Image: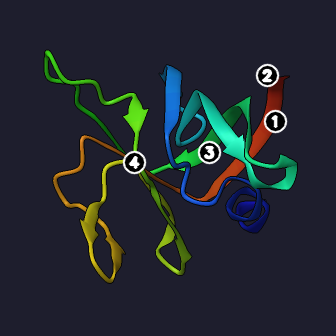
Amino acid sequence: MFDLIIDKYESFPDSLISSVSYERSNENDGKVDIIISCMNGYNNDEFETIKLSFVGVFKFRFIENHPFSSLIINKALLINDKAGITFDFFPDIYKDGLKENLESDFIIKCTNVFFEVIDNE
């Protein structure tokens, strides 16, 4: 699923998050759902709204300082390695690429991620 997300949505350039939901119970690790309007590379970069579901969340950081928005995404860093899956929506941007921002305003680390299309705009 992770590879399909990268294939279709790349680094979520020029995306807009409309909803962030976090839940945690005694039976499992945290779960984060976000609703995001993003470009689909499989469909000539037409925008569509999808729901990303992050399960087994072991790090979740979301900070929104007025008057700035942490819901407008320029580019996200997506990593899948032995440490888990990382979605850093505010990575450090360098000439040679993106790097994880340890002070990111919006980052999720988890064991698995799923998506579903909500609306083709």
In this rendering, the count of numbered labels is: 4
- Which SS class for mark 1? strand
- Which SS class for mark 2? loop
Q: Which residue is mark 1?
A: 116
Asked if 70 appears above or below 115 in the picture, the reply is: above
Q: Quadrant of the C terminus?
A: top right
Task: Name the residue type under label 4.
Answer: Phe
| Marked residue nearer the N-terminal end (2 or 1) | 1
| Disc sitting over residue 80 in the figure | none
Q: Which residue is mark 4?
A: 89
Task: Name the residue type under label 2.
Answer: Glu
Q: In 3D space, how far apart are the residues under numbered discs 2 and 1 (Cα atoms)?
A: 14 Å
Q: Which residue is mark 3?
A: 55
- Which SS class for mark 3? strand
Q: Which residue is mark 2?
A: 121
At x 19% / y 24%, what residue is drawn? 68
- The image position of residue 93, as x and y in percent, is 27, 65
- Is residue 95 toward the left or the right of residue 11 in the image? left
